[in-house]
Amino acid sequence: MLPLRNILFFLSLPASLTRAALNCRPEGPVIPRPTSLPQTPIFQEAASKLSRTLDAAVSGSIDAGWPVENSSFSLAVVSWDQEDSAVPVWEYHHLAKENKQGTKHLDRNSQYLIGSISKVVTVYLLLESGIDLDAAVTGFLPSLDKPDSTIAWQNVTLRMLASYLGGSPANYGFSEYYFLKDVFVKLGLPPIKDTDYPPCGIAGLNKECSDQQFLKGMTELHPVTAPMERPIYSNSAFVILGMALERYTRKNYTQLVKEVFSDSLSLQSTFPSPGDDEKAVIPPVDSTWGSDYGPNTAAGGLVSSISDLAKFSQALLSRTLDLPPAQVNEWLKPASFAGGPYTMTGMPWEIIRPFNITPSYAHPVTIYGKSGGALGYRSQLSIVDDYGIAVVILTAGPMSAVSVLTDAMLSTFLPAIDEVSRDQAKNYERKFTSKKGADVPFEVSLSQDSASLTLSSLRRNQSDIFSSLLQIWEIAMGEFIPKMGKTIRIFPSDLVSNSTLDGKPVTSEVWHLWPEYMPEPTTDLPSIGIEKLGCVNWMNEDWVRYGGEPLDRFLLYKDENGRKSKPAAPKPPTNTLVIDNGADTLKAGLVRGGKIDEPKIIPNYIARDSNARKVYVASEIEKCRDFGEIQFRRPVEKGFIVNWEAQKEIWDREFFDKNAPLKCDPTETRLILGEPPNGLPVIETNCDQMVFEEYGFASYYRGIGPTFNAYQDIQSTFQTPKDAATVANIPAEAIMVIDSGYSHTIITPLLQGRPLQSAIRRLDVGGKVLTNYLTRLISLRHFDMRNDTYIVNEMKELACYVSTDFKADLEKSWKGTRGEKRPDYISGGGIAKDYILPDFHARSKGILCEYDPARHSKARKAAAQTEEDALALRNERFTVPELIFSPSDAGIRQPGLADLIQESLNELPIGLWPSMLANIVVVGGNALFDGFIQRLQKEVVQRVPDDCVVRVARPANPITNTWYGGANLANHAHINKLAVTKQEYEENGAAWVARKFSAGFGA
């Protein structure tokens, strides 16, 4: 049976989460915190949006609100369940262009002065030490206990000092500015002598204070307030706390930071200033980098990094610090109000409680913050425990950036994370029923409204227990509470334990029912709604009982499969194999832990030497010495893998065999595979099945190869100043990629990395067609080389070029009519070249050299004066690549490349034309033909409006540019959203994977 005293359910569902937009609710999360944030599309979209906005700010496209040229910064979002405590779920770094000193490679391990965030470390040391926080400070520092002291230090405890409630002065010495002495006098203050200043700590006047001088000064300054009257921000309080710690532990502060804080959390960059100049972010303005803060270190003299603060924040949020969870809960509590309606203080927190930070579901959200400042540095740590996240901001330079960045990050991420929680909470929305044939049947339903999870129905043995509960509360509480409403909300607690139910291991979570009350009765007396402001519901928890058990206690039992909203996702692979799988060569390489290796260009075929009867697989072709009449078996046709037997043999040899050059374990590796657009579904599905079922890759993304180029640095390709977003953060805004490879030439317009499908055009002219055309010409004019296409292909790559004036070059190389040979035909107007064929004994490669008529003399050949086979190449050199611009020359019924570009543009909104035309990037092997870029630019200019700027460029290495784009994508946050895990493939099937990949990628 189901007694009313406990509402017990076996709930085999994911531990999903939500937030409720309520003004009156239990303190803390409305439901458990969100999990796996980086894998959620909502968080990814918010992160991508903020990254783009920051790119625009640092590039000057929008007003940042601070001088970006002098400001370097590192930003991070930390989650309580992130897989690597040192790696935030989102981060962003910007190194100011004016930075000349310190690190040149800003990342999460770069060091900053963190200013008063050091106070958080000092409080942690206090908590870890076991010192009595409620003991008077004079018990540790007797020199403060003087009868003539202006401050009654015997009434001030360590807890008061850590909470800004001790009434102690803000500073001693260093906030007096000796260099402003004359300015103060000019402004009307009376002149003073140097001896009127404190005897130490005054920059430009005297030395840093010793411990004794500081403590003596603390007995001579006046208190700011009485103890516990109100909070006063005080650095001197933390200097005193640091000294008290040293006396109590008999260790100096530097030892305590190292042993208790840094070593216990495995931190590498947190210690007292000075830091490591090579790792430092040193601003191009006056700063205190490199200073020794002495006794002031406990108040604001530590160095740290994003990585270290992420580790600390994650341990704090997950309650895995070397402190009991109850003590951490106590630490994250306010100690006093701080003057504003939404501000409080803690130890040493600066707490704000904004109401509208999640505007779609407005409710108070508590943010435990700590700001920090040093000359030239400013920082902010914000702990949002309800959501299990922290925001870390470190800046070097002008100090105005932090407030803008804090606002931007919190207002971007908190609404998104709140939305993630609500989305994950949908897994709780269901009906639970007893087993069939139960003696006492019951039925329970949970749902989610616009505010929170609610108990929507509860029936036992056909009785409406839901309505009965409301009546019981009203009867038991009487007039002590307002009238009940019709809604019963349900909220979690931290009471989570492991137990068993029906012999099965389960997790038990204690939740609490929270009935809503009706509005207060109307009255003609003056009223401001005090009762409503008081939120009296918290007074009624655990109040009404039956048989010794509270009626508002609600237990959720979850088995081991219900710990997450999905089965626990496998750890994302740290290595990624990126393959640009071309028809002639494949470009492949590894991205190991974020580091991009140099790619290898590997022949993508199996070659058979018909003479020696040898077989060469992929890169084994390097061992071949005679390429005459060699035969090829290619797994790729027209850009797509159609022969997996051959492709598997090549991949195995290069990636997976014992001695493979790029050896990797597919079960621990992500694969990024490039393919042409508009593939046949059956070919793509076959590819997906091979990747997961044959090789078992841990994760996989099959993308349109040309789109990878969006993740390259377009500014450097065009050799223009980098005045736009860097490729590490977002794909290029708008580019047109011309990929001219072995099988074909493809035109792919991209907008923010996404291919504009209707505008994609394919020209069926690529390296293969050009090689075959050259083979035909040579076989007609010189030797029969129809079985020597490998040699002809090398000849094409060495000798051919794209003419920028085809008619003029044709005229130069024209032989003339029979019997009337033109005089300049012999030299070919400088076009003619000799190609010396390889003999495969002394030389396995051909040689291109200047044309020499004597080399072709019949008399010389008859006299056996040369053993060289030489071909005189004239108009073949430019008529072959001309097929790219005029395919009809070889009977191919397609427009040329420039005409296809115009066709592609006609499919686009005219507003996109300027950005597309200004960013035409040519990749692929054919881009290496001399004159290709100039000819394409010339022809495109002739076809577009005069006011459009046309820029055509090829990258430094057009063959590997697509591969490097894929490698950049492997390091981008997008990849976690785009890739499919083996687990997802097994759960959802090949059709689901195909639909996901067909969407492409973009911002």
Image: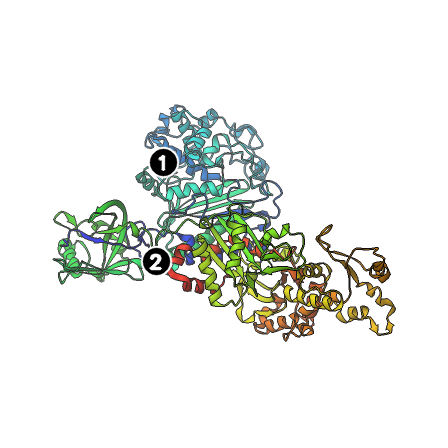
User: Relative to residue 199, is residue 187 depicted above or below?
Assistant: below
Give residue 819's position: percent from left, percent from top.
Answer: 87, 74
Q: Is residue 624 left or right of residue 828?
A: left
Q: Which mark is residue 422?
A: 2
Depth check, front residue: 14 or 277: 14
Colouring of the image: rainbow
Mark 2 burial class by Cα count in 10 Å: few <14, some 14-19, many 20+: many
* Mark identifier at residue 266: none
Please identify the quarter of the rendering in which residue 282 is found.
Answer: top right
Q: Is residue 886 visible?
A: yes
Residue under the image location 41 percent in, 64 percent down: 991
Quadrant, the N terminus: bottom left
Disc 1 crowd, CA 10 A, few/some/many (<14, 14-19, 20+): some
Left or right: residue 276 compared with residue 779: left
Please say if the residues under marks 2 and 1 sit with CB atoms less than 8 Å apart.
Answer: no
Which of the marked residues, 2 or 1, is nearer the chain's N terminus? 1
Label 1's element? loop
Q: How many marks?
A: 2
Q: Is residue 706 above or below residue 374?
A: below
| Residue 989, x across and y down, in percent | 39, 61
Amino acid under disc 2: Arg
Question: 346 or 674, which lies in front?
Answer: 674
Name the residue beneath numbered marker 1.
Answer: 322
Asked which quadrant contains residue 769, the reply is bottom right
Q: Report which quarter residue 916 is drawn in.
A: bottom right
Disc 1 residue type (three-letter)? Asp
User: Is 585 situated left or right of 802 in this image?
Assistant: left
Relative placement, left or right, of 422 versus 797 is left
